[in-house]
Image (spheres, coloured by chain):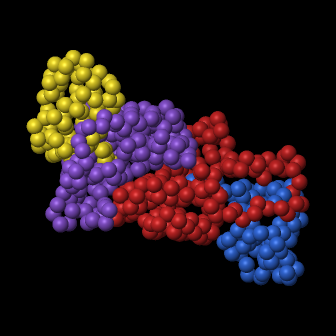
Chain colours: A blue, B yellow, C purple, D red
Amino acid sequence: MTVTVLLFASYADALGRSTVELPLPDGATVGDVVSGLGRIAGAAGRLPAAPMVAVNQSYASYDQVVRAGDEVAVIPPVAGG
Amino acid sequence: MTVTVLLFASYADALGRSTVELPLPDGATVGDVVSGLGRIAGAAGRLPAAPMVAVNQSYASYDQVVRAGDEVAVIPPVAGG
Amino acid sequence: MRVALVRRPIDAAALLAEVAGDECGATTLFVGTVRDVNDGRGVTGIDYTAYDAMALREMEAIANEASERYGTPHVVIEHRLGTLAVREASVVVAVSHARRAPALDASRYVIEELKRRVPIWKREHYLDGTREWVDPTGRGTAEAARTSGVAALSAPTPDPRPAVGVSEESRL
Amino acid sequence: MRVALVRRPIDAAALLAEVAGDECGATTLFVGTVRDVNDGRGVTGIDYTAYDAMALREMEAIANEASERYGTPHVVIEHRLGTLAVREASVVVAVSHARRAPALDASRYVIEELKRRVPIWKREHYLDGTREWVDPTGRGTAEAARTSGVAALSAPTPDPRPAVGVSEESRL
């Protein structure tokens, strides 16, 4: 399956884009998404080792399974207010 | 000496006036003011036993000495805000 | 820093603007308003009265204490006197600070101290047409003391001058 | 109860009016503003950006939590996005309640949770013309991590989903 990963703020700047299409095996987890992001062209070293991730607009743990159609986002340290 | 005592809110209502002229011996204390108030005509039972008192617009202890010309006030439980 | 007793509606937005500062990241406004129920009785309005000169002195002292404790000059307190209807603001406390935690702490300090020390009194108007002075100490009004036979003026053991800082400890 | 992301100035006085209620004796307003200095650097403005849909969900969740914990339906949160100048309000939290203590507590709960959970980011503009994303965790930006050689994406040990209530404990 292919998952679209949303990038924001410093992470979007770091990778020079706001979305990444990531091919993943069925049963892949949030942790696999993070690992997969590290392997895309130009990403090495540009994101922190263990960023926060949201699936369908809720914070997700790294063992959560990702399904086709899920909205996955990598969340930089938040700084609202 | 004579001391003018200011009354406010429920205390003024209880005594039916907002000031009391109180004759006191030299060296009288705040405690003496409170006792003196209890002896004026119509005051018996109308004020609580130990009200707060302010001298010159600051809260005062009962052993503070009162001087002629001091601004003395009996302060009902405050309820601002 | 400014404190005032006013006899007209308080302009909360003006106070918000008054405490603004380029170095401030947080502004807090506390607004006390007349509510329609107190202790289960329907309230239609409140008369506020004060020992004006002393109330202003205490309000100034409280603003100074908040300013020093929490480290900001931006503290404004206005208290309204007279007869207020339900929803009208009786007091507004505005504080701004570089940081949010001390701004919030200072705001709470001011309103707690104000309620504890400032000689202002309120007489509530009830739905049934009666009016009564409010005694937040729950020790009863002079009238209640009188009718219940509590003896007058015999035991000179007043409340000690309240120590500054009590309310801060009670927040912990 | 209402939450919003807006791209125009926030009208604090309107929010104050919005949370008013006959049964409310206390209203609190928290206003976050752009300040001219952060970490010792002169700031001229801030760009705010958000993951809008998720930010609104988190803001709604926070407003609901505050409403339930502190017992009032009167909670409104507006956060502004876009480029703001010094002194402009980025966020306003308005709460009203019958009593002042829960009104103040709810206000603090909302702003602390908002800063902890809501996916909004800010890029500060500095006096020297540079701009930088702010990382309140102090763990450094992605750029900082890169240039300092911190390895990427190798140790999948994320921050756990923050437990609701941590900030309340930290207030004690």
Residue found at the far top of this picture:
B26
Q: Residue at x 80, y 77 (%)?
A: A65
Rendering coords of residue D108 (x, y %): 53, 54
Rendering quarter of residue B27: top left
Seen in the picture, residue A55 relative to B22 is either above or below; the reply is: below
- Where is residue D48? Give x, y as percent: 59, 55
Q: Is residue C120 visible?
A: no
Left or right of D31 in this view: C146: left
Residue D158 can be seen in this image: yes
Residue D46 coordinates in the image, percent (x, y): 59, 49
Residue in the foreground of this view, choosing between C142 and B80? C142
**Quick check: C90 left or right of D96?**
left
| Relative height, residue A41 to residue B61 (above, below) | below
Closer to the camera, A15 or D60? D60
Q: Judge by depth and name the residue closer to the eye, A53 or D94.
A: D94
* Residue A26, quarter of the rendered image: bottom right
Q: Residue shown at 31%/34% (left/top)?
A: C156
Question: Where is residue D32 drawn, in percent x and y?
Answer: 52, 50
Seen at 15% across and 63% down, the residue is C129
Q: Quadrant of residue D55?
A: bottom right
Q: Is residue B3 above or below residue C28?
A: above
* Quadrant in which the N terminus of chain C is drawn: top left
Q: Residue at x 79, y 62 (%)?
A: D158
Q: How many marks?
A: 0
Q: Is residue B38 left or right of residue C74?
A: left
